[in-house]
Image (cartoon, rainbow, N blue to C red):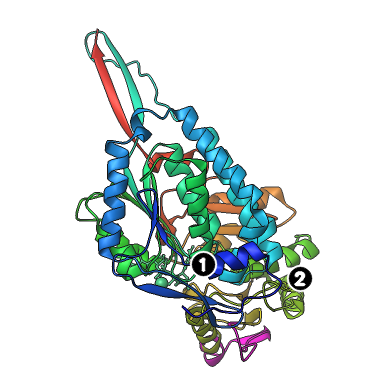
Amino acid sequence: MATIALDPRLDKNTSNFISSEHRMLIDGKFVKAASGKTLPVYNPATGEVMAHVPEAEAVDVDRAARAARRAFDEGPWQRKITASQRGRLLWKLADLLESHLEEFAELESMDNGKPLAVARAADVPLAVDLFRYMGGWATKIMGQTFPISFPGEYLTYTLREPIGVVGQIIPWNFPLLMAAWKLGPALAAGNTVVLKLAEQTPLSGLRLAELIQEAGFPEGVVNVLTGYGEGAGAPLAAHDLVDKIAFTGSTEVGKLIVGAARGNLKKVTLELGGKSPAIVFPDADLDKAIAGTASAIFFNHGQCCCAGSRLLAHKDVYDRVVEGVSDIASKIRVGSGLDPETQMGPLVSEEQYQRVSGFIDSGLNEGAKATAGGRPAAEKGYFVHPTVLTHTKPEMKVIREEIFGPVVCAMPFNDDDIDRIAREANDTIYGLAASVWTSNLSIANKMAKRLKSGTVWINCHNVFDAALPFGGYKQSGWGREMGGDVFNSYTEVKAVTTAL
Ligand code: NAP
Ligand code: MG
């Protein structure tokens, strides 16, 4: 492998890790792909290859699934390790991660392109917090007793047991945090895991695998693979030794996962796309609403499943809101994630760059107007200017489909009827999130009841917490992540009845 000159601003440890020979974690050992094949990892700020990671294929997935199966059926994880010890392992992992905060922030910025300051303030601390929170749950996952009415005398209770081997597939928008959302609850509940990282952003997950080893999880309990969706993700979703598959990514691939899971009817949870509305009422605090709806779409370059990508503003305030959001958009400093001045980095990959630029062109060709952005940003790297589109029509592709980039479509509504406004906001196949901006709490909560989405934010957007369930209505997914609700999909419930 050719050595690549990495950014001199990076810490030595981070550069060394990026340039090292990467291996996957299978059965407690760091290994190459059986084929010896690797895939390239690109720096999105330059488009250059900065590392190579193993390219797992079906044979590697099989090895990992067998290791996870053995660890679940025969290893100490189920028999010897108590709930309290599982909690402590997760806390140890959280402590290790926290003590490497800067290194992980750098890895995330290099791999995904996001500003270092964002990774430092959001991605890494939220992942630490998630592991700690889930560690606390390990001792609190419990069944109930039931006063049954069947004739006779019985003692009846439920046990909440881990499902078994869990396959997990994650995307590239929050590489470390998505790994934490997946691993934390699965392990707290006592499952074993095969996690496939996103091809575009495998570095923080591979480094996390080293910390998982250092924390002392028994061999085979956590297996971490790098590879392509079709080569490694598909065989994982189809594998007969896997009892449950948890997927985050596009709705399109989510449907493939459901198909692949059919063979052994493994349990499936899906956290998919969105086309979330941010709805501004005329009585909103407009300064806050403008800043908040701009951040709803431009945070993480719009590469958020819950990005506020449809901006619905009442006709009385529409012009001011569009002007305000466009003004913010045009002042956002776009550049390399490592540059301290940068407020928005490059998109994650050439593919995403083409995809998002294609959406912008399609909107403009169909008659939309750009009041900010609207054109490619640089000759090098995958930069797209924050873009605000107006004059859109409900049937346009930019309104119907998830763009997953820094592009917001603004639309006025001419209505004061809450049911009609909600219907317009709900006019999408998705149902992940929504935000409502108003100083009238009655309107806000009436809207919250009417919106068909797993999350409703009132006078805020993108507020996340490990304690809050997150997931989608409609084609935004199945099941919930985080909070106590996540354990509904990481445990089986067993009813035990004893005749007394
Ligand atoms: P994607 O294709 O859905 O990828 C998500 C994960 O699934 C990746 O790990 C991917 O592997 C894997 N995968 C792909 N095909 C698979 C298959 N047939 N079987 C099993 N796993 C498979 O998403 P993407 O290509 O990264 O992005 C495309 C679009 O999806 C975005 O523009 C956006 O609209 C949407 N998206 C949504 C979210 C979200 O959180 N809602 C996240 C990411 C993307 P590899 O990437 O390694 O090949
Ligand atoms: Mg893909």
Secondary structure state at the residue bearing disc 2? loop
Q: Disc 1, disc 2: CB below 8 Å?
A: no
Q: Quadrant of residue 390?
A: bottom right
Determine the main secondary structure of the stretch shown in magenta: loop
Q: Which of marks 1 and 2 is nearer the N terminus?
A: 1
Q: Mark 2 points at which residue?
A: 340
Q: Nearer the viewer, residue 24 or 135?
A: 24
CB at disc 2 and ligand 1 closer than 8 Å: no
Residue 486 on image: x %, y %: 45, 43
Q: In which of the image's four quarters is ligand 1 placed?
A: bottom left
Q: Mark 1 points at which residue?
A: 20
What type is the residue that disc 2 sits on? Pro
Tell whether position 365 is magenta: yes
Residue 348 on image: x %, y %: 54, 74
Task: Look at 64% across and 61% down and name the residue there.
Answer: 105
Please report the bounds of the magenta region as a residue range: 362-382
Task: Look at 35% across and 33% down and name the residue there.
Answer: 76
Q: Can residue 467 be seen in this view?
A: no
Tell whether position 300 is magenta: no
Secondary structure state at the residue bearing disc 1? loop
Residue 418 on image: x %, y %: 60, 58
Q: Nearer the viewer, residue 135 or 275?
A: 135
Q: Dot 2, how many residues are within 10 Å of its Cα: few (below 14), some (14-19), or many (20+)?
A: few
